[in-house]
Amino acid sequence: MASTITTSGATITSMGVGSGLDLSSLYTNLETAEKTKLNTITTQQSSFNAQLSAFSKLQSAMQNLNTATAALAKNDTWNAATIGSTNTAFSATTTAGAAVGSYSVQVKALAKAQVLTTDSQTSSTAQLGSTTGTTRTLTISQPGIDKPISVTLEDGDTSLSGIANAINKANGGVNATVVKAKDGAFTLMLASKTTGTANDMTVSVTGDDALQNIIGFDSSTHTGAMNQQTASQNAKVVVNDIEIERSTNTISDALPGVTLSLKAESTKSENLDVTRSTDATKKAVNDWVTSYNALQSTIATVTKYVKVDAGADQSTSNGALLGDNTVRSVQSQLRSLLTNVQDGAFSIMAQLGVTQDPTVGADGSMGNLKVDDAKLTKVLSESPDAVQAYFVGDGKKTGLATQMSTVLTGMLSTTTGKEGIIKNATDGINSTLKSLDQRYTAMEASIDATMARYKSQFTNLDTMMSKLNNTAAYLTKQFSS
């Protein structure tokens, strides 16, 4: 530590120069010794921060398990359906809660969109409207669409291409295309973007009778200059002798949870088989087992113990939550739920093909679950309602998944006044870390004060020794003379 000391005979610019002692090294050694007082605090901080990180991993694994458990506790998971038939006139998809059963379906008509065309014109770019020096308004209205297309056309915009560009830029319910049949033969084609009779087009021009006589059309009376190339049509489907009519070929509101996509008209009925899906429910069970085992693996990691020789320090590879009561509580509560006997045809997990593995995993985890796929598939196929009852129960207090979801939700709760054990544990750690931060700051201030005192003392010593040395030199000189 450098300092400047002024005496009557000299200026000292480095600690120890005035006294001839190695005060700079002594000061550094004292400072190093003082700062060791902070090591205990930083060690504790590192330990508690490691615990926070471990709790974060534990919480994430618990949340994943809770998500999988909640899915297993939902009736919709068990009501998943699939299409068990292959059809040619239509295809079908299902959602949760689809009505299981066999249906007779005939597609009598496909929904079509109206298409209008103008008479052939010799040019696609020639002006068709009157030369007025002003604008005219082209309007295309459709009963099924609230906002009609309304575009303003200058004199030069009244060609087939100009009209098509203006309509398409409006981005309404109509597509406009100029079709070239051959040289000198062009037609404007207007196609409704939406199928069904409710979307027929009425085209009118205000302020230009000449253009009105080329592209005008009234769909309510089917009169006007344009030609109806394709008439609109609603889809018609007969399901179990009930005729259903819709404006679109995708029908999602006829059978609960079933969407029909019509592809072709048919002269006879086809069978539509909607069956309960064992694949979806089996996946839900396997996802739950995977999440449970992942939690056990996380617990094994954060509580890992590495054996050391007698008398040796504990291994630095030990888990941050080794011996933690909160982790033990989480693990024991969840394991005890697995052994609960449920009411119904299936009372224990083993009857479903899900058992606990008594061996220790490679990561040190214990009590992992394993699935006998053949047995699970069999019970889901033969007794799906009984398997559902085992996991869901009454949806409130009974059923393994219902009970586990309730326990996990409580453990993970962050609601004020209803904090779960994870939040309580992390809140305690954060409180301790805050206290350690305060202690660290106070200790730093104390060390700084102590070192300032040492520096002052060394500076005074340097000054005094410098004066004494100067006096001694002066006296020696006087005596010798």
Image (cartoon, grey):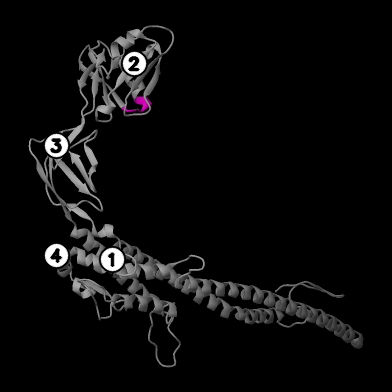
The image position of residue 190, as x and y in percent, is 27, 22
Give left or right: position of 241 versus 180.
left
Query: On the image, numbered disc 2 is attached to which residue?
Result: 204
Q: Is residue 128 visible?
A: no
Quarter-wise, where is residue 54 in the image? bottom left
Above or below, 192 relative to 445: above
Which circle, 1 or 2, is nearer the viewer?
1
Q: Indicate the secondary structure of the residue bearing disc 2.
A: strand
Quarter-wise, where is residue 30 in the image? bottom right
Q: CA distance from mark 2 to mark 3?
A: 36 Å
In the image as oriented, which residue stretches furthest toward the top?
131
Q: Amino acid at mark 3?
A: Val
Give left or right: position of 387 versus 103.
right
Between 109 and 21, the one nearer to me in the picture: 109
Between 448 and 253, the one nearer to me in the picture: 253
Q: Earlier in the sequence, mark 4 or mark 3?
A: 3
Query: On the image, numbered disc 3 is attached to which residue?
Result: 107
Between 176 and 400, the one nearer to me in the picture: 400
The dot on residue 382 is: 4
Q: Earlier in the sequence, mark 1 or mark 2?
A: 2
Q: CA distance from mark 1 to mark 4?
A: 18 Å
Give left or right: position of 463 versus 345.
right
For image coordinates 22% across by 51% down, the residue present is 98
